């Protein structure tokens, strides 16, 4: 889930998108009515991508929680932040079973679902994983095409017939010189018989 450039401003309802940055302020646009105005350093601004929720283990980034809601709802809207406390807590337990019940207040839980639904309505819920999968698929397709081109470019080498091995039986008999008196007579070394 990409929450980059989305902020909450203390004392103002809703969420805002950062449009531009000035010397002493930010130009922001409301995700509700698309009105633009400057936000100053004196305003308490919270970037959604920096917010995390307390759990009994490690803190979990808000974008991961938004991602879980998105998957649970099949890219649909979440429960209304105006629902009763028990329903909101039960819903959060489904997507974040180990959230710290002592440090995460009902007002925090309401904000999570309110913000999710604002982002959903504004069309700002973007899945990072889908983009990554698409990029990986494109890379794999390119790699496959490159390999195919390389294989096509190579001409198949003519296959050589395997060299025949000469066995001892097929080898020509070795000849040694055998002396008989003054004459040397050639006789086969291996047990082949000579004709008389």
Image: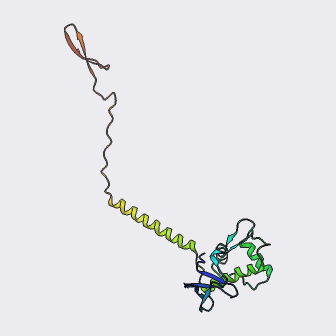
Position in image of residue 192 (x %, y %): 30, 20
Which residue is found at the position 28% from the left and 22% from the top? 174
Reply above or below: 151 against 175: below
- On the picture, is 100 further left or further right than 146? right
Count all numbered tags in the image, as a single digit: 0
Which residue is found at the position 71% from the left and 81% from the top? 111
Considering depth in this image, is 47 or 181 the residue closer to the camera?
Answer: 47
Which residue is found at the position 77% from the left and 73% from the top? 103
Position in image of residue 27 (x %, y %): 57, 87
Which residue is found at the position 50% from the left and 68% from the top? 136
Considering depth in this image, is 46 or 193 the residue closer to the camera?
Answer: 46
- On the picture, is 92 further left or further right than 142? right
Where on the picture, by quarter, is residue 109? bottom right
Residue 30 visible in the displayed image: no
Q: Quadrant of the N terminus?
A: bottom right
Position in image of residue 43 (x %, y %): 66, 85
Reply above or below: 112 against 160: below
Where on the picture, by quarter, is residue 180? top left
Considering depth in this image, is 166 or 112 the residue closer to the camera?
Answer: 112
Q: Quadrant of the C terminus?
A: top left
Coloration of the structure image = rainbow
Q: Residue furthest left?
A: 182
Considering depth in this image, is 166 or 70 the residue closer to the camera?
Answer: 70
Position in image of residue 87 (x %, y %): 78, 79
Residue 108 visible in the displayed image: yes
- On the picture, is 24 further left or further right than 111? left
């Amino acid at each position: 889930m990409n929450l980059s450039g989305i902020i909450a401003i203390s004392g103002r309802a809703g969420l805002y998108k950062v449009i531009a940055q000035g010397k002493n302020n930010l130009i922001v646009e409301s995700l509700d009515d698309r009105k633009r105005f400057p936000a100053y350093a004196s305003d308490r601004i919270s970037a959604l991508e920096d917010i995390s929720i307390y759990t009994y283990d490690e803190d979990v980034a808000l974008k991961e929680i938004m991602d879980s809601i998105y998957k649970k709802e099949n890219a649909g809207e979440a429960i209304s932040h105006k629902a009763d406390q028990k329903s909101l807590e039960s819903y959060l337990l489904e997507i974040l079973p180990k959230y710290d019940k002592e440090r995460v207040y009902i007002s925090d839980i309401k904000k999570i679902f309110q913000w999710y639904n604002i982002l959903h309505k504004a069309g700002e819920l973007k899945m990072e994983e889908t983009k990554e999968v698409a990029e990986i698929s494109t890379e794999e397709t390119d790699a496959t095409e490159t390999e195919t081109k390389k294989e096509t470019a190579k001409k198949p080498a003519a296959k050589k017939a395997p060299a025949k091995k000469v066995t001892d039986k097929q080898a020509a008999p070795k000849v040694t010189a055998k002396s008989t008196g003054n004459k040397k007579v050639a006789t086969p070394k291996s047990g082949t018989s000579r004709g008389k």
